[in-house]
Image (spheres, rainbow, N blue to C red):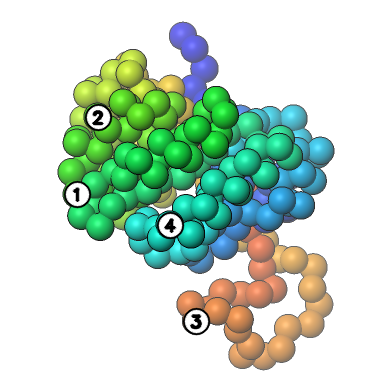
Amino acid sequence: MNKILLEAPVFNLHGALEAALKGIDRLELCSNFPEGGETPSAGMLRFVKSEVDVPVFVMIRPRGGDFVYSHKELLVMKQDIQLLGDLGADGFVFGVLDEQGKVHEAACETLLRAANGKPCTFHRAFDASLDLFDALEKIIALGFQRILTSGGKNTLTEGLQQVVSLLNLAGERIIILPGGGTKPEHVPSLKATGFLKEVHASCKLEQATGNQYLTPGLSFSSAPLDYGKQWGVSQELVRAFHGVL
């Protein structure tokens, strides 16, 4: 049986290096954790690629919020794909919807061409689409290699049965990449379909940064995060996933 690949989203250099060191098979490199992921900097990608020996897929998302983009935002996304591709990105992660919640096929085609044959994942914009099964067929026809999904729900725990249905419907036509609060206990149900090839899980672990002084009550986010902490990767969780994959 082929090994099931474990991908982790990483949002900072510390997390990226820990993930590669602790057994993650592929990185999804992003910025801006509170917004659910945005495009990382060129310098970040170039440095990460010089330090790790696992594939690095790059999030292409110019802002948080919805997945309906203006013409100029799409031009930025195209240029980010070209620039980050030249700097060594192994693949790209993006998704575009139209105002009615359907896959924006023309915009996706443009971005796929910009990727110049590198594999592309349609990310959880899929979960925001009007009809998951219609979106699945359009994404397959466009030529994406995989879909990252929690089954149209906030977490994989809530959408697990929908993801099982998507795995069975997609079959060998595209990789369904379960993600969104993924836990090791989700894996047996997903594997039972016979179509599970990859799993997306952050395995995140909150860690101190080493900063010895914090200004009391100070926050830099409207959704307060502890600026004396950063996200690393839990070796225990990585081992737990590898134990069931």
Location of mark 3 (residue): 222
Residue 130: give its label: 1
Give the residue at x 45% y 39%: 110
Q: Is residue 16 above or below residue 161?
A: below
Three-letter amino acid code of the residue under disc 3 = Ser
Of helix, strand and loop, which one carries label 2?
helix
Q: Is residue 130 visible?
A: yes
Residue 71: give its label: 4
Location of mark 2 (residue): 137
Crowding at dot 3, Cα within 10 Å, few <14 / some 14-19 / many 20+, comes out as few
Residue 225: give its label: none
Residues at circles 2 and 3 in contact by the CB criterion of under 8 Å:
no
Give the percent coordinates (x, y) of residue 2: 49, 12
Q: Which quadrant holds residue 91?
A: top right
| Left or right placement of residue 187 versus residue 159 in this view | right
First of labels 4, 2 by sequence position: 4
Q: Is residue 170 above or below residue 70?
A: above
Give the percent coordinates (x, y) of residue 174: 36, 23
Give the residue at x 67% y 90%: 216
Of helix, strand and loop, which one carries label 3?
loop
Of helix, strand and loop, which one carries label 4?
helix
First of labels 4, 1 by sequence position: 4
Three-letter amino acid code of the residue under disc 4 = His
Give the percent coordinates (x, y) of residue 134: 19, 36
| Left or right placement of residue 51 versus residue 191 in this view | right
Three-letter amino acid code of the residue under disc 2 = Glu
Three-letter amino acid code of the residue under disc 1 = Leu
Q: CA distance from mark 1 to mark 3?
A: 29 Å
Crowding at dot 2, Cα within 10 Å, few <14 / some 14-19 / many 20+, comes out as some
